[in-house]
Image: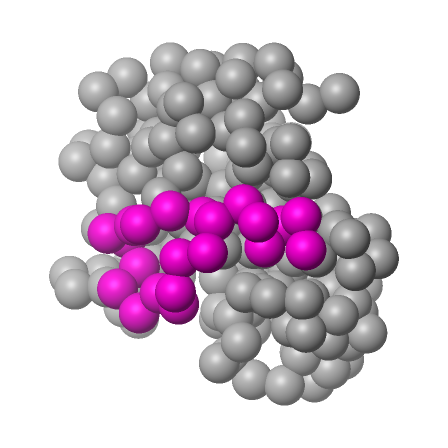
Amino acid sequence: MGSTNCTKDPYEVLKDAIRGGITMFQFREKGTGSLVGKEKIQLAKDLQQLCKQLQIPFIVNDDVELALQLDADGVHIGQEDGDISEVRAKIGHKILGISTHNVEEAKAALKAGADYIGVGPMYETNTKKDIREVKGPIVIQQIRESGVELPLVAIGGIHNGLLEPIIQAGADGVAVISAISKAKDNEMAAFELLDEYKRYSF
């Protein structure tokens, strides 16, 4: 989540989401109207401090240099965000997440030293404009059946009521933005998603 994904103060949104039960946070300051320079860094620091206080891992999306500057817990990169092996070498033992869209990319991420894999898009989403073709939960199943045992995190257009096929396909977790950040009650939105996740995971 970043400032452009919120209808109120991002700090308050994150605080409520943590109260609601999220287990990891990814700082993603992108899109029209997003903060840059000192303002972006300050927001990242504020949100990171909140995560530290409440013991939530803080991951930076795409920006490896910012992740290193902040001493973040990790970084998440997409297929177009540079050489995976180079990023791993730069960040050392920090958490490395990689976005994948098929079995080949998932196997390459595993080989390059990813700690977890983002798989998507599961459904249509308005948050990310340049998304790949929507193939749905079947991709998670295919990656699982190929022998990749890394944690798989489903992403893309996920809202309440959509988790069952994702979890049954083999996902270990789900990543959301607007389902929490644009909800009327951020804490309740996070709680309901977690409750639904627990219902189908075993």
- Is residue 193 a member of the stretch shown in magenta? no
171, above or below 19, in the image: below
73, above or below 197, in the image: below
Q: Position of residue 133 (x, y in %)?
A: 39, 65
Q: Position of residue 145 (x, y in %)?
A: 78, 53
What residue is drawn where x is 68% and y is 23%?
Answer: 201
Q: For this rendering, which residue is in front, 133 or 119? A: 133
Query: Colour scheme used in the picture?
Result: one colour
- Is residue 128 a member of the stretch shown in magenta? yes
Q: For this rendering, which residue is in front, 136 or 36? A: 136
What is the quadrant of the C terminus in the image?
top right
Left or right side of 188 for 139: right
Residue 16 seen in the figure: no
Q: For this rendering, which residue is in front, 97 or 148? A: 148
Residue 54 seen in the figure: yes
Q: Position of residue 8 (x, y in %)?
A: 19, 33
Q: Over which residues does the magenta segment extend?
A: 122-142
- Kindly indicate the quadrant of the structure image that contains residue 157: top left
Q: Position of residue 154 (x, y in %)?
A: 55, 46
What residue is drawn where x is 67% and y is 79%?
Answer: 84
* Count of residue discs: 0
Q: Main secondary structure of the magenta part?
A: loop
What residue is drawn where x is 68% and y is 55%?
Answer: 142
Q: For this rendering, which residue is in front, 84 or 94? A: 84
- Kindly indicate the quadrant of the structure image that contains residue 39: bottom left
What residue is drawn where x is 37% and y is 31%?
Answer: 159
112, above or below 179, in the image: below
